[in-house]
Image (spheres, helix red, strand yellow):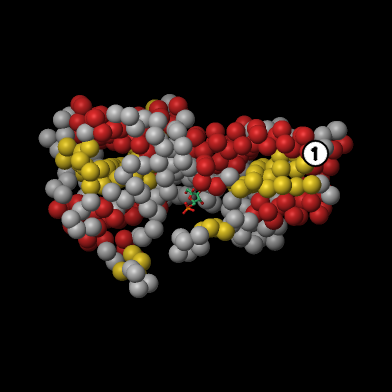
Amino acid sequence: TKRIGILTSGGDCAGLNAVIRAVVFRAIGTYGWKVLGISKATQGLMSRPPEFVPLDIEKVDRLLTAGGTVLGTTNKGNPFAFPMADGQLVDRAQEIIDGYHLLGLDAIIGIGGDGSMAILRRLAQQGGLNLVTIPKTIDNDVDITECSIGFDTAVNTATEALDRLHFTAASHSRVMILEVMGRDAGHIAISAGIAGGADVILIPEIPYTIANICGKLRERQEQGKDYSLVIVSEAVRTETGESISSTDPSGQFRYGGIGQYLANQIAVCSGAETRVTVLGHVQRGGTPSPLDRLLASAFGVAAVDLIAEGHYDRMVGWRDRQVISVPIAQAIAHYCVVDPNSTLAKTARGLGIYLGD
Ligand code: F6P
């Protein structure tokens, strides 16, 4: 029998609890192991005594549809340069490694994005931890896997927002601008933009000009359409390359900005009335879509099976209709952004959507 830990790390997203449920069902239901839910990512292992909740089937039974993560999470505090109260950055990696051994764990499942996976892997290498990871992030920027947990739900939410904005845009003859998340990748914007019928999709991977956006709006006006929908990814820069949307380095607050910048610029150059919606964290919380529940269930079962087979230092993923697993190093070697020549990009252009350039 084995004793395994599970933790969620980095920003929350829909489907994390569904993964926890699947892991417990498989680990306890099939193999009869013990499962410890580690509190607040690696911080639970850093605490003394380590903070965890013993999980059982009863506790996770109703978690399939619950948003967030019952284990808690954080994206603050890289343990290799952990910010102390006095502002000093201290290497606390060994405390986490010791926490793992104090709990007598045989293996740990880490649910995280590329940043969390890189940190977990470094800890595993340094401290001899048996690690398996599961990709989650609304940004869908983890390489190798076609989708990460949380992405589909975020795309659903952003698409629904566009559907709603469509009515107001048409009723008021306005240009409505929707700013969505995605970190440095435009996956949410391009997917929701196509699915929600946007006229302009701006992503960090493809440069744009205000003049070309306004050209697109004029073209629509000439066709008798006096309203438009624009979707923009948070990391898109100003026309002159200035970055204006981000989280401040301390993680204390976020600057919005690119949506408002575009609203001002488009109003000036087209004369249209513009309004901005910054969608924010509603893309992260909430009930997972059926696809995210499926992925969460498949990934949870597969991660436990990898441990049962003694295969560590691997990430599970989804490719060609099935679960795969790859060395974590391979998954974090590249940051996955939108390929400007991908099928989705070609589709957007093919539909007459302005996608930049
Ligand atoms: O990585 C997920 C994500 O929601 C990004 O899309 C966004 O840039 C960031 O996290 C927001 O982080 P925070 O919750 O710290 O503001």
Check mark 1 vs ligand 1: CB closer than 8 Å? yes or no: no
Taking the image as shown, residue 24 lies to the left or right of residue 152, namely left
Q: Outermost residue, left direction?
A: 1
Residue 283 is left or right of residue 108, and the answer is right
Residue placed most toward the observer, 165 or 98: 165
Does 4 sit above or below residue 21?
A: below
Camera-side residue: 196 or 186?
196
Q: In what element is the residue under mark 1?
A: loop
Q: Can residue 87 be seen in this view?
A: yes
Judging by the rendered image, the residue that carries numbered circle 1 is: 173
Q: Which residue is drawn at 29% across and 55% down?
A: 43
Mark 1 Cα within 10 Å, few/some/many (few <14, many 20+)?
Answer: some
The spot of residue 151 in percent (x, y) is 48, 38
Residue 301's image quarter?
top left
Residue nearest the observer in this picture, 354 or 167: 167
**Residue at the location (51% across, 46% down)?**
281
Which of the image's four quarters has the N terminus? Answer: top left
Total numbered circles: 1
Looking at the picture, which amino acid does disc 1 mark?
Answer: Ser
**In front of the other: 276 or 140:** 276
Q: Position of residue 131 (x, y in %)?
A: 26, 45
Residue that appears at 17% across and 37% down: 34
Please provide percent x and percent y for residue 236: 62, 53
